[in-house]
Amino acid sequence: MTAISVRDVWKEYGEQVVLERISLEIAPRSFVALVGPSGCGKTTFLRMLLSQETATKGEILIDGRPVSPEPGPDRGVVFQRYSVFPHLTVLGNVLLGAELKAGGLLGRLFGRARVRAREEAVALLAAVGLSHALDKYPAQLSGGMQQRLALAQALIAKPKVLLLDEPFGALDPGIRAEVHKLMRQLWHEHPMTVVMVTHDLSEAFHLGTRVIAFDRRRNLPEERLRYGAGITNDIEVWPRRIAGRPDLAQDPEPPRRDDLAASEGQPDRDDPADAA
Ligand SMILES: Nc1ncnc2c1ncn2[C@@H]1O[C@H](COP(=O)(O)OP(=O)(O)OP(=O)(O)O)[C@@H](O)[C@H]1O
């Protein structure tokens, strides 16, 4: 049950203040959706939670301890694109997630540990509706299937915190709705706290337990370098969603695994990886 505390965090790149005075207490098992105009620092904030960036000032605590200086398996991430490895099969991608968590000599798993990891990977791929695609390569999958694979790859490491950067932004509306249902189901089933960046306000309210807006309070051209974005809105979504309680009335029916399998489409034409 993982809580995140963000205490008076600032982020500057050289002269440019990107974020200022960010203070947040994120309760365990929350699903926080982060919205805000382009360039206001949402991805930068996520990268600080992931330890891909460090705060210029302030501190970030996970379960009361300063966030480790290196990205680790306690935090999983899914991006809009390119979260998975194009040269590995679907199963290979998820197994790699398990191996990276195991660490050790080049992160390889052997013997019983590898058999167990394979079983877990197969089960997780079934949970995201990809049982029929274990031996396919990412370029052979539709955009929705690739994002489901990316979720499985992140979840095999059992992250305490799952960070999502516009994960569904490139999907067609119909596919996106299916993946939303899956995402919500995964949040109910896995004991993780989720922070998701999105441009889409309706997606934020559809999935989140809390919607936080970043924006600049001072945005005149001469102020843009010296003043960063801060939290301008912090909304608890009502009626409340409670992790692990998909039975509550406000949660629509979870998807059937068959629906997910049926929703697969052609490879994503917008994706250069597919065009190749
Ligand atoms: N490594 C970096 N070096 C210098 N400036 C950076 C770096 N990373 C981000 N920035 C700057 O920080 C600001 C915030 O960028 P960021 O990508 O976090 O915004 P965002 O809110 O996620 O934008 P978008 O919604 O368009 O993805 C931008 O002005 C960007 O140019």
Image: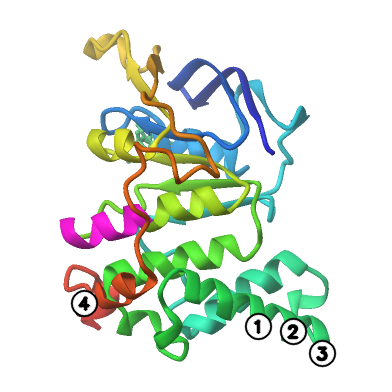
Judging by the rendered image, the residue that carries numbered circle 2 is: 114
Which of these two is toward me, 188 or 159? 188
How far is mark 1 from mark 2, CA to CA? Answer: 6 Å
- Residue at image x 40%, y 86%? 133
Residue 253: mark in rendering = none
- Residue at image x 32%, y 77%? 261
Judging by the rendered image, the residue that carries numbered circle 3 is: 111
State yes or no: Cβ of the residue under disc 2 lies below 8 Å from any atom of ligand 1: no
3 or 1: tag closer to the N-terminus = 3
Label 3 is placed on what type of residue? Gly
State yes or no: Cβ of the residue under disc 3 lies below 8 Å from any atom of ligand 1: no
- Residues at discs 2 and 3 in contact (Cβ within 8 Å): yes
How far is mark 4 from mark 2, CA to CA? Answer: 31 Å
Query: Is residue 72 depicted above or below 205 in this figure?
Result: below
Judging by the rendered image, the residue that carries numbered circle 1 is: 118
State yes or no: Cβ of the residue under disc 1 lies below 8 Å from any atom of ligand 1: no
Res. 236 image quadrant: top left
3 or 4: tag closer to the N-terminus = 3
